[in-house]
Image: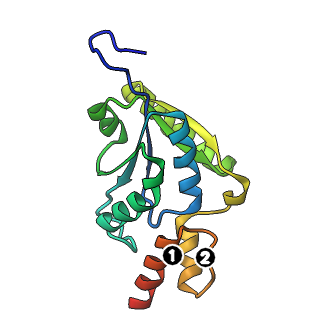
Amino acid sequence: MTGPESEGPVLRRAVCPGSFDPVTNGHLDIIARASKLYDVVHVAVMINKSKKGIFSVEERLDLIRGVTAEYGNVEVEAFHGLLVDFCKQRDIPAIVKGLRAVSDFDYELQMAQMNHGLSGVETLFVPTNPTYSFLSSSLVKEVAAWGGDVSHLVPGPVLEALTERLAER
């Protein structure tokens, strides 16, 4: 497939947005699956100055880059503001979101409709692997803070960083 005004192929692009504080195996499952469907997957790490995360934005970027390097077609960037503006600036026509439960769908459907209305960007919903249907970054942080074993919920480098960070507190 080639573009009408270019000599090269048109790349199929999508974005997987989130806070990723920390990135979990559930996040990685969605990113990995998107990377098989798209030529380029942008992982957009949201900057929210009013939210104090366990990891800085730079640390989250580094962790995600490390654990997605094997896919070969994932680009990791930070963003603030509207996701549709991020998409417009990079000519990304699709947002890929994982859905764990009906409660996720209710919220994400509203966001998808708003994003489409603002910019025409489509949202594709991917059901999570049942292994990760309960998983959230908040839950991982809470369990880890109480000394629970989260080694099966996050990639090795994230577990190391999380253990180190919690030991500092």
Viewed as shown, does residue 26 lie left or right of 70?
right
Label disc, if present, on residue 159 of the rendered structure = 1
User: Element under label 1?
Assistant: helix
Instruction: Identify the mark nearer the N-term, 2 or 1.
Output: 2
Residue 18 drawn above or below residue 141: above
Residue 142 percent across, percent down from the top left = 55, 78
Tell me the crowding category of disc 2: few under 14, some 14 to 19, or many 20 or more residues within 10 angstroms, Cα based: some
**Amino acid identity at mark 2:** Val
Q: Quadrant of residue 4?
A: top left
Label disc, if present, on residue 46 of the rendered structure = none
Q: Quadrant of residue 153?
A: bottom right
Viewed as shown, does residue 11 lie left or right of 145?
left
Residue at 60% of width from left, 75% of height from top?
Answer: 151
Can the viewer see residue 107 in this picture? no
Residue at 33% of width from left, 68% of height from top?
Answer: 59
**Amino acid identity at mark 1:** Leu
Of residue 19 and residue 103, the one placed in the foreground of this image is 19
Please name the colour scheme applied to the rendered image. Answer: rainbow
CB within 8 Å, label 2 to label 1 = yes
**Disc 2/disc 1 C-alpha distance (Å):** 7 Å
Residue 144 percent across, percent down from the top left = 56, 81
Residue at 56% of width from left, 72% of height from top?
Answer: 140
Residue 114 percent across, percent down from the top left = 45, 33
Tell me the crowding category of disc 1: few under 14, some 14 to 19, or many 20 or more residues within 10 angstroms, Cα based: many
Can the viewer see residue 78 in this picture? yes
Of residue 87 and residue 113, the one placed in the foreground of this image is 87
* Residue that badge 2 annotates: 150
Residue 15 percent across, percent down from the top left = 43, 40
Residue at 46% of width from left, 67% of height from top?
Answer: 22
Residue 165 drawn above or below residue 66: below
